[in-house]
Image (cartoon, helix red, strand yellow):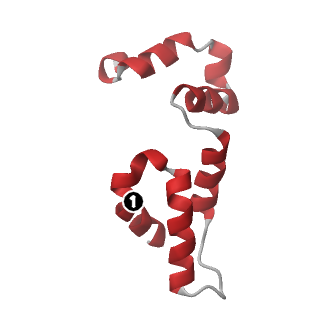
Amino acid sequence: MVQYHMDEAMVDVLSALEVEEAGDYDKLKSTLFRVFGINNSEERYMKEFINRRQRENDSVEEYEGHLKRLLPKAFPQLKDQADGILLQQFG
């Protein structure tokens, strides 16, 4: 049933996964990243963006600037949603 609600690329990925890969989070994640074209540097920037908090000595402008520099590196495919992503990170 789930496969009817997925796009073709996702169906191909799931059918190609071995049971062993599907049960191992790191293998599953790296397989999905590879298939959908997310490279390791993007993953690193994603983690940095998501985990970045305003430091005690950061002004709001400095914090915002840091997030704005990380955002296109972390989520290059989501340029149209950049403002919404930044607002969520501030929240």
- Quadrant of res 28: top right
User: Circle 1 — which element?
Assistant: helix
26 relative position to 38: left or right: right
Q: Look at mark 1 in the image and give the residue it sits on.
A: 82
Where 87 sits versus 58, above or below? above
Nearest the viewer among 67 and 12 is 67
Question: Residue 42 versus residue 19: which sits nearer the camera?
Answer: 42
Frontmost residue, 23 versus 64 = 64
Crowd class of label 1 (few under 14; some 14 to 19; many from 20; radius 10 Å): some
Q: Is residue 65 above or below residue 42?
A: below
User: From the viewer's perspective, is residue 60 above or below residue 87?
Assistant: below
* Picture residue at 43% right of the left edge, 66% below the top: 86
User: Could you tell whether 80 is left or right of 10 in the image?
Assistant: left
Percent x, y of residue 87: 39, 68
Q: What is the x, y in percent for residue 78?
A: 40, 49
Q: Position of residue 54 (x, y in %)?
A: 59, 78
Against 23, residue 17 (above or below) is: above
Location of the C terminus by quadrant is bottom left
Q: Nearer the viewer, residue 41 or 6?
A: 41
Name which residue lies at 62% across and 62% down.
Answer: 51
Residue ID at (50%, 17%): 14
Disc 1 residue type?
Answer: Ala
Find residue 40 and report its horizontal and vertical position in percent.
67, 41
Q: Quadrant of the N terminus?
A: top left
- How many labels were placed on the picture? 1
Please give the name of the residue rendered at 66% of the width and 88% of the height, measured from the top-left corner. Answer: 57
